[in-house]
Image (cartoon, rainbow, N blue to C red):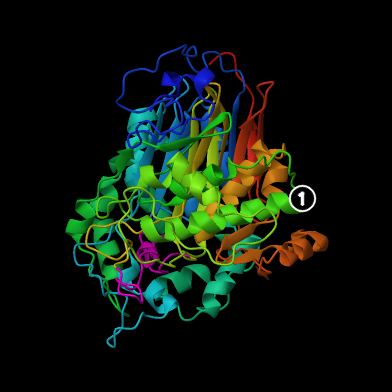
Amino acid sequence: MSIKSINWRGATCAVLAAALLTGIAGCTPVAVQGSSPPAGPIEAAAEPNWTSGGMVAAANPLAAEAGAEVLRAGGSAVDAAVAVQGVLSLVEPQSSGIGGGAFLVHYSAATGDVITYDGREVAPRGATADMFLDAGGKPLRFFDAVRSGRSVGVPGAVAMLELAHREHGRLPWRQLWRPGITLAETGFAVSPRLHEMITAVVARGSLPANSAAYLTLDGQTPRPVGSLLRNPDYAATLRRIAVQGAKALREGPIAEEIVSAVRADPMPGTLTLEDLRDYRPNRLEPVCSTYRVYLVCGMRPPSSGGVAVLSVLGILSHVDMAARGATTVAGWHYLIEAQRLAYADRDTYVADDRYEAVPIAGLLDRDYLASRAALVSPDRAMQRVEPGRPPGAQLRGRDATGGTTGTSHFVVVDGRGNVVSMTTTVESLFGSQRMAGGFFLNNQLTDFSFTPFDDKGQPIANAVAPGKKPRSSMSPTIVFRDGRFELAVGSPGGHAIIGYVAKSIVGMLDWGLTPQAAVDLPNVIARGLVVAETARMDPALIESLRAMGHEFRGGRSGGEASGIHAVRRLSDGRLEGAADSRREGKVVAVPYDSTR
Ligand code: GLY
């Protein structure tokens, strides 16, 4: 999908979802992939004279610096993303890594093309619909399933980066892994958050011997803050990846190590060398909708993120949110109600669309979203929120699976105006906690529904099947205005990602906040009960929302703490980034270099 093919001057009420949606009743279709060019004026080439410099916003300073180093060397946004992932996998292994999966949204400034890359893990051939049920047919305890070999999907992050690099890389692939290799060999200081996460995972029960040796001093005592952590096995793995590419994880000694780690007790998985060998990442059209004067693009299934964020925004487009600011009861009331409606639909209808007919067009249909918006009262919370019946939907059971604490998001803008918005995950803290080749293996398959049917006997779209990808909530997003890049944003947070990202977009676009102020807004997630960072909220605001009938629960936001990273291009062309203070992130600006 190219943003250059859009008639921005006519794009006032149109809804667009590339590749899937055709003209939507009542609006001017602004761009439909595969259709003839729209009538009317077309903006000039996107970003022909980019002078904004580059920027990296990531969850760890060492990773952000590695990305910036690549940009200074003339690398592209994708080049920098490879380096960021190589370092994150080492210094923030609780959240993402080369043993996990990822989604990447890419914007090419030269062509105006927006494309997404799907590096989601797949279930092995031996996966079965009942593999997360015990002998009595009851769902396994969540953390038993996480630690089992059954939870491990075929990793996809490196293969996805390899594909994106083939299409958008400027620097040699092998150069991009150097920052990770160097840090793994020389060592890095354990950060407060890494220490905290090691403490949390140790408290949950015994670790496999190799991860206990890596994360603790004596099998139990978490490595202290500031201690030097080296990982020569990871350095050796990266050296292989630097030379062989993703093939290094598909066959040979590292692949064999992955298979034996997955097939170890307790509850071995079925993963085979054939499963690893056959993994291929996908290049997918984005799912995009207009929101006011903006075009918002995100991931299509197997992530529910793009569709759900666009559903929230589509419902809010019926409300003047700008007139209801970030401190108003009405503003938060509408944000909560839009989330409740969008989550109900997302929980019910979105899954891997190679296996399930996901009614993406129906879910984002303007009239359908208008009918959902009409359910919202201006002064009372809805009593019950049920999924709707969007056009094209089949009856499905609601799936409450949510995801936990092992994801990271980063944004890169390079010196030519290309943008990467990438969310990357091992699913839970340190994934399955199983290690191979110096890295952690994901537990992404626990993002599937543990049961294939709901309690009314309805099939669940997100049930396990061999070769299927578990539904994700990851929502890497890029927003455009008038044919130009406006902002990129995303977050970790399990199912709460959708709420974190929607809040940040509303904060920046409707409430006029800086990226940092939007990220700093309290997280309020409304999937069923409202779970909110009440400590960040004015008590009078909470009281007013309660009086409207909203049931509040304090604390985190129902998933993990957010780690929202964003970059916005201001009207004067400067870039402004934000790193979530709930984590350890950093924004690094790389000034414009007229010699490149
Ligand atoms: N495991 C987090 C997600 O994919 O949403």
In the rendered image, residue 30, in percent from the top left (x then y), is placed at 44, 25
The residue closer to the viewer here, 44 or 190, is 44
Q: Is residue 521 above or below residue 223?
A: above
Q: Mark 1 packing: few (<14 Cα in 10 Å), some, or many (20+)?
A: few
In the rendered image, residue 272, in percent from the top left (x then y), is placed at 20, 63
Q: Which residue is denoted by mark 1 in the rendering? A: 328
In the rendered image, residue 343, in percent from the top left (x then y), is placed at 49, 58
Residue 566: quadrant of the picture: top right
Q: Is residue 86 visible?
A: no
Residue 240 is left or right of residue 3, and the answer is: left
* Residue at left offset 51%, top offset 20%: 10
Q: Is residue 252 above or below residue 201?
A: above
The residue closer to the viewer here, 442 or 226, is 442
Q: Is residue 403 above or below residue 38?
A: below
In the rendered image, residue 558, in percent from the top left (x then y), is placed at 57, 66
Q: Is residue 526 visible?
A: yes
Q: Is residue 200 above or below residue 53?
A: below
Residue 240 is left or right of residue 569, and the answer is: left
Quarter of the figure that contains the N terminus: top left
Please, which residue is most extreme toward the bottom here?
136
Q: Is residue 454 magenta?
A: yes
Secondary structure mostly seen in magenta is loop
Residue 139 is left or right of residue 407, and the answer is: left
Disc 1 residue type (three-letter): Thr
Q: How many marks?
A: 1
* Residue at left offset 31%, top offset 49%: 392
Please, which residue is most extreme toward the left here?
274
Decide if ligand 1 comes within 8 Å of the CB at mark 1.
Answer: no
Helix, strand or loop for disc 1: loop
Q: Which residues are magenta?
A: 430-458
Q: Is residue 386 magenta?
A: no
The residue closer to the viewer here, 388 or 21, is 388
